[in-house]
Image (tube, helix red, strand yellow):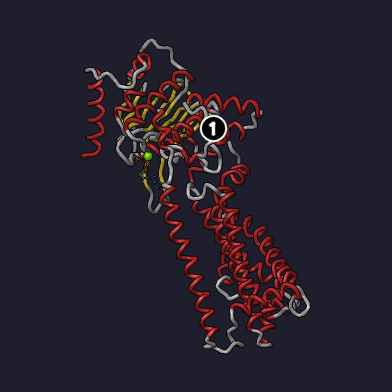
Amino acid sequence: MENEVKKEVLIEINNLKLIYGSEGDSILALENINLEIRRGEFLCVLGPSGCGKSTLLKTIAGYIKPTGGSCLMQGKPITGPDWHRGVVFQSSTLYPWMSVKDNVEFGPRMRDIPADEVKKISKFFLEQVKLTGFGDKATFELSGGMKQRVALARVLANYPQVILMDEPFGALDALTRNNMQKLIRDIWKENNSTIFFITHDVDEALSLATRIVVMSKRPGRILKEFNVGFTHRLYKDNSIEVMYNEEYFNVKNEILGLINSQIEE
Amino acid sequence: MDSEKQTLSKKDPEKEKRKNKNEKKLTVGTWVVILIAWYLITKFEIFSPTLLPSPSRVLTTFFRLLEDGYNGVSILSHLRASFRRLFLALALANATAVPLGLLSGYFSKIEAIIDSVVEFYRPLPPLAYYTLLILWFGIDDKSKIILLFLAAFAPIYLACVSAVSKINENYILSAKSLGANQKNVFFKIVLPACLPEIFTGIRTAFGVSYTTLVSAEMIAATSGIGWMVFDASNFLKSDVIFVGIIIMGITGVLIDAGLRFLERKIVYWKGHV
Ligand SMILES: Nc1ncnc2c1ncn2[C@@H]1O[C@H](COP(=O)(O)OP(=O)(O)OP(=O)(O)O)[C@@H](O)[C@H]1O
Ligand SMILES: [Mg+2]
């Protein structure tokens, strides 16, 4: 790890503080967050419910402004949402008045990419999420897993610098979820994407992440970071299940211990 | 992942069909009973035939009116006069209420200006201010169209305001993160997301303005299907009254069916937002 070349910092968060509401009844959601997201990372965020994970994601996305501190992308302050940071929500936000293909093509169209290029892009990414032939379907004809794959393709179609995902597989059944984890890992590797991924499932984080951030209960702070590499092995073996070895259990137990200490207090 | 192909969501069409069939039978049965009762009541002359004409007399009157018209004016031109007023008013209401409603939902300042005015006049029976409109705009079509426009405006406007407030916030956030600018968010996301509710508003508006139209024609007009019924009542021509009422009922149902057909075609995703 030590001699790995340091990659370019895409997102830089310094002393981030976030307060919801106005003076009378305000909620301190995030405090003193310092975090860097480097190109090519798969960063997973874990933490007790209500600790501010989604708030952190929304700040990076540009949906809410920091109350204090700064949130930079490639050195420039994030002032609002833009297509360099794609977002996948827990429940799909596909537009039911557009076909699957039109949903995927929405981003490139908004950016005035030439029509034939747009066609190529949507074909390519529908294939990558294994939905070739579903382009003309209505979104409400799809299963939950398929919807999330379209949502992913729609974000990928913009070639974003960072993909932000808020418990994207949280509403899926266990089997579909495992398939989706493999899919997102393969896509991350193939496209060399950078992913910021919120989950409440420690195994999911361990099987996907190159780095895991554990947050405290509200106000959310970063308790500890873990560099892990199980995802590389899973990718190399083209496998779905993690080999549960001692190293895996040690990290998992430490993370669980941290999270539980936050809930019990 | 291929197993997911089978899980494409579907309703149970067989069951739906059977249920529909039974209910259709009930509907048809109800009308058969009503017609039989009508026939029997007139057959035994329970009420005087001047007050309640028999079905056969209403039918012959209908054909006579089709051929000769009422008071020398064909029934189609009465209908045309009515629907010209109705559709001009509805078109005008759509063209103004939809943008104003969407903007009100979007910008609270615009809502603050328009909303209270709409809330004030909406519960008023349209005929209450019709007299004023006649004084201001004259007794012919202009005052009627404005009356119907006002009646139709409120439901469409309110449907738009409510539709905007109910939009899934994440639809808009997603669009922005995909690179959509303010204008595209409005036309590609907000407008279609509101369409199902706008359609419901339009159907309500049609119902309200249709009833208003008939009453207005009864008060002040020399043409139109409402006027025909009113005029016939002055001369106790109950068969003409019946024909008029049945025509109004059937055209109302037909137009609503047409609107529902359009709704199914245009907002086929309704219920999936
Ligand atoms: N718009 C808002 N206005 C006021 N308070 C908010 C708002 N959004 C979130 N909060 C509060 O901020 C805190 C953090 O919320 P957030 O949604 O970021 O948590 P989370 O870690 O994503 O939780 P979960 O795991 O349940 O998704 C919570 O206490 C929540 O009640
Ligand atoms: Mg959350």
Q: Residue at x 55, y 68 (%)?
A: B119
Q: Quadrant of the C terminus of chain A?
A: top left
Query: What residue sits right under mark 1 in the picture?
Result: A135
Q: Quick check: B204 above or below B69?
A: above
* Secondary structure found at label 1: loop
Q: Residues within 10 Å of mark 1 (few under 14, many from 20)?
A: some
Of residues B37 and A52, which is closer to you in this image? B37
Name the quarter showing ligand 2.
top left
- Residue A17 point in image, percent of width and height: 40, 38
In the image, the residue with mark 1 has its CB under 8 Å from the nearest atom of ligand 2: no
Q: Residue at x 54, y 53 (%)?
A: B196
What is the chain identity of the residue bearing mark 1? A
Q: Quick check: A24 above or below A181?
A: below
Q: Residue at x 22, y 35 (%)?
A: A261
Farthest bottom residue in view: B48
Q: Quick check: B88 above or below B37?
A: above
Q: Residue at x 35, y 19 (%)?
A: A231
